[in-house]
Amino acid sequence: MKSNIIPTSSKQSGLRGGRALLVGAGLALLASAVAVRYKTQQAEMKNPPTGRFIDVDGVRLHYVERGHGQPLVLLHGNGSMTRDFELSGIVDLAADDYRVIVFDRPGYGHSERPRSTIWSPQAQAGLLHQALQKLGVERPIIVGHSWGTLVALAMALEFPSAVRSLVLLSGYYYPTARLDVPLLSVPAVPVVGDVLRYTVSPLISRAMWPGILKQLFGPAQMPQHFEEFPVWMVLRPSQLRASAAESAMMIPAANTLSKRYRELKMPVIIRCGEDDRIVDAHEQSGRLHREIPQSDVVLTPGIGHMIHHLVPHQVMEAIDQAAKASQPARVVSEHVHRASTHLN
């Protein structure tokens, strides 16, 4: 009869192996944490705030302001910051005719994001509305890109008399099945997400960055000016948490807001790349246009998610169209249009 007794020497060897594995994993996490901390400090030193700060309800918001004229507010997407709009050229182009205000949304760039608040589109809309009131901004044109379109829509729905018109770029407006959401949301999970954000998540994200850019810009090539984008600023643990939280919130936020789109009365100008790899242009932008009578939509073929970088002059034309539109708005389009493939 065979014995099931494991020799003491084998048990001790197994225990030693397990301890060695735990020690090795701990040292690897420690090394990752040191590297992430160094990269974070280096990124913040190289990219100090270029704008001003305003305190609203105990939240310190960073914003960049340029130009004079009709107020124009720019809201960046998930995982981004004010630098995104600056690099695209939109800020320089718009500052000739508009008072341009670009916010770092809560948790991004140099803006705070208190963990005591669930920063839904409605919560961000309320905060930014108060910020604009403090800045003396009345009835601005609101431009939102990607996740920023949800905040722009929330502002228009919650404070309709305070918004002149909307320009929505590459937005996600209706709930759909998204396989990427569970993966992208992990860094926002309490405890486990906190550990990952300060150790391996930034390093993994940096290794994936070239592939992420192909998804964002494809099928077009990434413009050379985007090489100046401060990658490590968006990979900091604090910003990764904001980004993950918004990924988790995206589907329910779109579900809630989509029930109210017909309440919108101001002009709505919709622009997107027809070949967007992040959101389906026809399913999202095309559907929104059909639901809002006073909207105008253009789908540009050969263009991906980062439309403001690839065709900035088309975006400026949309902003000018929003500025000229009267209120109550006239119906500016009855069909989905396709823009030319010319890249500015």
Image (spheres, grey):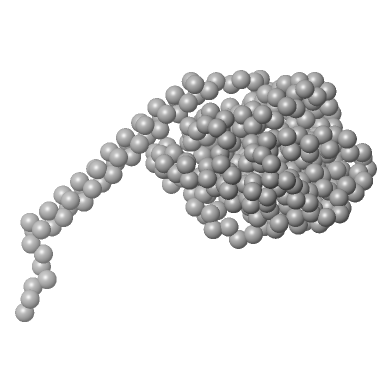
Using the image as rendered, state which of residue 315 and residue 13 is in the foreground. 315
Q: Locate residue 25: give its quadrant.
A: top left
Image coordinates of residue 90 in percent, x first then y, are: 70, 30
Quarter the C terminus occupies: top right
Using the image as rendered, state which of residue 135 and residue 329 is in the foreground. 329
Q: Is residue 133 left or right of residue 40?
A: right
Q: Is residue 162 left or right of residue 222?
A: right
Q: What residue is shown at x 23% (from left), y 48% (from top)?
A: 21
Q: Locate residue 8: give its quadrant.
A: bottom left
Q: Is residue 307 left or right of residue 196?
A: right
Image coordinates of residue 224 in percent, x first then y, are: 55, 32
Q: What residue is shown at x 40% (from left), y 27% (from top)?
A: 38
Image coordinates of residue 194 in percent, x first then y, are: 45, 41
Residue 148 is at least partly visible in this image: no
Q: What residue is shown at x 73% (from left), y 27% (from top)?
A: 93
Q: How many marks?
A: 0
Residue 304 is at least partly visible in this image: yes
Quarter the N terminus occupies: bottom left
Which residue occupies the extreme bottom position in the image? 1
Using the image as rendered, state which of residue 92 and residue 238 is in the foreground. 92
Image coordinates of residue 189 in percent, x first then y, are: 50, 48
